[in-house]
Amino acid sequence: MAATTITKWMILSLNMFIILTLTHAQQVPCFFIFGDSQSDNGNNNPLITKAKADYPPYGVDFPGAIPTGRFTNGKNIADCLAEFLEFPHPIPPFAATKGPALLKGLNYASGAAGILDNSGINLGDRLCMNRQLENHKATIAQIAPLLGNQTSADVYLNQCLYVVNIGSNDYINNYYQQPPSPSSSLTPDAFADELIATFSTQLNSLYELGSRKVAVFGVGLIGCIPQEILLYPITNGSPCVDDINIAVGIFNGKLVSLINDLNTKLPNAQFTYINMTSIALGGPGPAGVTEVNAPCCEVQKAGDSAPGQCLPNGSVCENRDEYIFFDNFHPTEISNTFTASRAYRAFLLTDTSPVDIDHLVR
Ligand SMILES: *[C@@H]1O[C@H](CO)[C@@H](O)[C@H](O)[C@H]1NC(C)=O
Ligand SMILES: *[C@@H]1O[C@H](CO)[C@@H](O)[C@H](O)[C@H]1NC(C)=O
Ligand SMILES: *[C@@H]1O[C@H](CO)[C@@H](O)[C@H](O)[C@H]1NC(C)=O
């Protein structure tokens, strides 16, 4: 080849390389996830708890059809968000990750975990939000040596995306648990105040630990999940347990105020609220989904080890893309993809406030 041809070829490949890296570049260097079973991807596997998804049919649609500890048939919301952010792999679980791999971020989420330390205790061990923050501190202690010093670790941590999706268990496995918990006697407003006071401290700690881009999911319409409809009588012809959705709405309203507050008070921070109600009820739902009440898997019954979760090796529906729920608590992959896509790029103005995750990371 003549030298000019080689040069042209090199320029062409360099262009290709730039285009490829630009189009496939991760939008953030790192992504940290805090939450409950909606995000757990294996942290509960080694724990002694009934909140486990390390057996079939969980994971039936995951690559290799292996149960990983995800409480769904395939990907969860955190997996989908990592894909939209163009991470080449899902963010690994804290429990199984060591060394430089943690620089891309970790998933601390734990099934049955809540904002309050005690929520989910009825199911056994779990990593409550405060434990997840402790685990994040331990991670940060490893990042400084990997990057050379604390200053470069701080700069790095400021660039990461942080997603927090927690609070459902404070209702399902605390306030509305059966038999009732000590918190059940509080008014919904007083209970929401207690949650918000604790959550405020936790989100401030997350800021102190270097987070600057934080998406906080509100609690979804848990009065509409099959397990709550089984436990609580439905009134007024409503398809859902309205009292639960009203109580959760009180919490979400206070959470929006908290997030506005944090954005005013914390320099250089951008917190954003993901509105699960808007995503669930506003605009068209996931295409092709027709079964909005029944779970896809055969679930455990009252008196079994974990009522409402899939029966180990139990039967599973064929048409999983047509179901909202995989078990009596958790959405299917198609629902998770739908929710994640609206959190990443808002379809309605009310889906996210003030910004969607796409704008948060830009
Ligand atoms: C920290 O590490 C960075 C990158 O290696 C370097 O540029 C910087 O001077 C170091 N800062 C301190 C305080 O050692
Ligand atoms: C969340 O969505 C609901 C339903 O669309 C709406 O009524 C509410 O105002 C939204 N909240 C925020 C903070 O946008
Ligand atoms: C489920 O099936 C697998 C493979 O057949 C078997 O190893 C396992 O013990 C079964 N688990 C339960 C809980 O029945």
Image: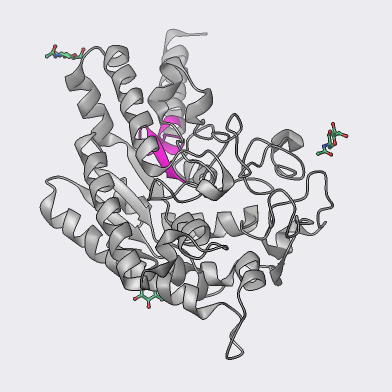
Residue 22 seen in the current view: yes
In the depicted structure, whether residue 149 falls above or below residue 248:
above
Q: Nearer the viewer, residue 285 or 13?
A: 285
Q: Quick check: which quadrant has ligand 3?
A: top right
Q: Position of residue 196 (x, y in %)?
A: 28, 59
Q: Nearer the viewer, residue 61 or 122?
A: 122
Going 51% across and 46% down the picture, which residue do you hit?
121
Q: Position of residue 284 (x, y in %)?
A: 55, 74
Q: Is residue 19 left or right of residue 55?
A: left
Q: Single out the residue that lies furthest toward the bottom.
A: 236
Q: Position of residue 316 (x, y in %)?
A: 81, 53
Residue 38 seen in the current view: no
Q: How many marks?
A: 0
In the depicted structure, whether residue 138 falls above or below residue 66:
above
Going 44% across and 31% down the picture, which residue do you hit?
106
Q: Which residues are magenta?
A: 21-35
Q: Nearer the viewer, residue 8 or 187?
A: 187
Q: Position of residue 348 (x, y in %)?
A: 41, 71
Going 63% across and 38% down the picture, which residue do you hit?
69
